[in-house]
Image: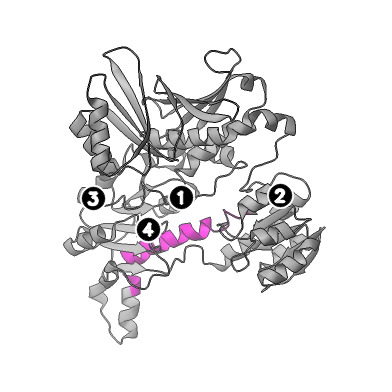
Amino acid sequence: MKVLIADAISDSGVATLRESFDVDVRTGLSEAELIDVIPAYDALVVRSATKATRPVIEAGAKLKIIGRAGVGIDNVDVAAATERGIVVCNAPTSNIVSAAEHTIALLLAQSRNIPQANASMKAGKWERSKFTGAEVYEKTLGVVGLGRIGTLVAERARGLGMKLVGYDPYISEERAAQLGVELVRSIDELLPKVDYITVHLPKTKETIGMFGPEQFAKMRDGVRLVNAARGGIFQPDALVAALESGKVASAGIDVFEVEPCTDAPFFRFENVIVTPHLGASTEEAQDRAGDQIAELITAGLNGHMVATAVNIAPVPPEVMEKVGPYIPLAESLGKMVAQLAREGVTEVDVMTVGGLAETDTRILRTSLLKGLLEQVTAESVNFVNADYYAEQRGIKVTETKRSEIHDYMNLVAVRAGAGKGEPVEVAAALIGKKNEPRLVSLFGYDLDMMPGDFMAFFLYEDKPGVIGKVGTLLGDARINIATMQVGRTTKGGQALMGVNVDSPLSDELLAAIVREVGMEDAWSVEL
């Protein structure tokens, strides 16, 4: 079999591939040139420069696997590859050590004023007393997000003699204890406990801007910050105000909302260290990416499991015929659970009911975990590695099967929660000849609601006028209601309202509805 390496990778990676395959290294090919040569190859390796577009993929009549020697996958048309049964994989762990080390570098550099002292000396000055620093020994580091990079940062900080406090609702207390991390239940609980804060979070609507004036006010005076994860997690204006007041003693920032970035409001502060997204920029990380992708390409061409495949893993045709329509439904349930479970998730039970229970439903469990974990981690979660990531986070996953039929021929349900907190329970089914998805139960309330891109759910006392008030407030906010469903347990008891809307509800609007209508609780969900 033949492998085309279209972007430069490590010499060792090339050598690994040449042990088993006929390898050509041809870099700098245009799309037209790539389309012309790709029909002869079984595998394609790219980095950032070469784009595996739909025309390229459709021209690759023999292509079995495409590997991107790096973390992202933006330059590969995954949908086109999936349609043609081509595995797409990347090297998501290639840069985690580099990213963790850069975090520690920013932490130490700001503590000891290293960039400022360097600039001062090169300007011909000797200002020893001006750059008195601070030890990190026995200081407390708050780690927000304990995925793979956050875990490595915690390990390295512990080696420096730092105390560790962590927040991640998707990691078990047992796993945190193994890392030597005191696990807290909320960011607000973490903020007043720590001298340093580092964030390792994905880019989501919840994380961008999550540190604003209210959060800064709860931090210790003189706190030091590091962001080598995603730009915008610390609100720029709030960060500037905290730097001006002295609430924040210093900060190290490697990532920005818009990149390249050559100016930002906090650039003017001498005690802020900025770097141009260098987290993965080490020779070792680049070499490791080439080595990892070579191993994965070899596994894929030899018919073995590709651990970092970002598209669906093969499922036997007879199984896929039964469970295939439920795969996107299960993934949507996972996304919902992640957004509804405020206390996080450390336990998940996936239940299949009816005929589904009589077949292999592991792909549905994996699909649900994929949807859940995509909401809480910056790492690339797919059908191959979702179970692995859940295990790494200490999430207990079980399956329950019930063959008896009640209201629906087949049903997928999930019960998820964290410890002693109130669990989230949601169930869905496919109905009719077109297999249309329906949410049929949430928190124990019966519904008949088609999942939409933007949904909101309201728990309230069952009494007249509530539906009208909600509709009015949404209308005043220019939010159009597509559908509405109400479920209740008993007349005059509690009721659950579910609405599909045409645009997302802000946290402020949701809170206003709860306050003005007198709701018991409310949730916003985006699929």
Image check: 424 left or right of 82?
left
Instruction: Calculate the distance from the C-alpha at mark 3 to the C-alpha at mark 1.
Output: 23 Å
Residue in the foreground of this view, choosing between 403 and 424? 403
Residue 358 falls within the magenta-colored stretch: no
N-term-proximal mark, 1 vs 2: 2
Task: Tell me the residue that label 1 is attached to.
Answer: 155
Crowding around mark 1 (Cα neighbors within 10 Å: few <14, some 14 to 19, many 20+) is some
Rendering coords of residue 456 (x, y %): 35, 34
Instruction: Calculate the distance from the C-alpha at mark 4 to the C-alpha at mark 1.
Output: 17 Å
Identify which residue is drawn at 33% across, 65% down: 110
Q: Answer whether labels 4 and 1 touch (C-beta < 8 Å).
A: no
Q: How many marks?
A: 4
**Residue type (three-letter) at the residue carrying disc 2:** Arg
Rendering coords of residue 329 (x, y %): 54, 33
Q: Which residues are magenta?
A: 90-115
**Nearer to us: label 1 or label 2:** 2
Can the viewer see residue 196 in this picture?
Answer: yes
Q: Which mark is residue 227?
A: 4
Task: Tell me the residue that label 2 is attached to.
Answer: 84
Q: Which mark is residue 219?
A: 3
N-term-proximal mark, 3 vs 4: 3
Q: Quadrant of residue 265?
A: bottom left
Identify which residue is drawn at 69% across, 58% down: 57
What element does badge 1 sit on? helix
Rendering coords of residue 451 (x, y %): 46, 33
Residue 105 falls within the magenta-colored stretch: yes
Crowding around mark 3 (Cα neighbors within 10 Å: few <14, some 14 to 19, many 20+) is many
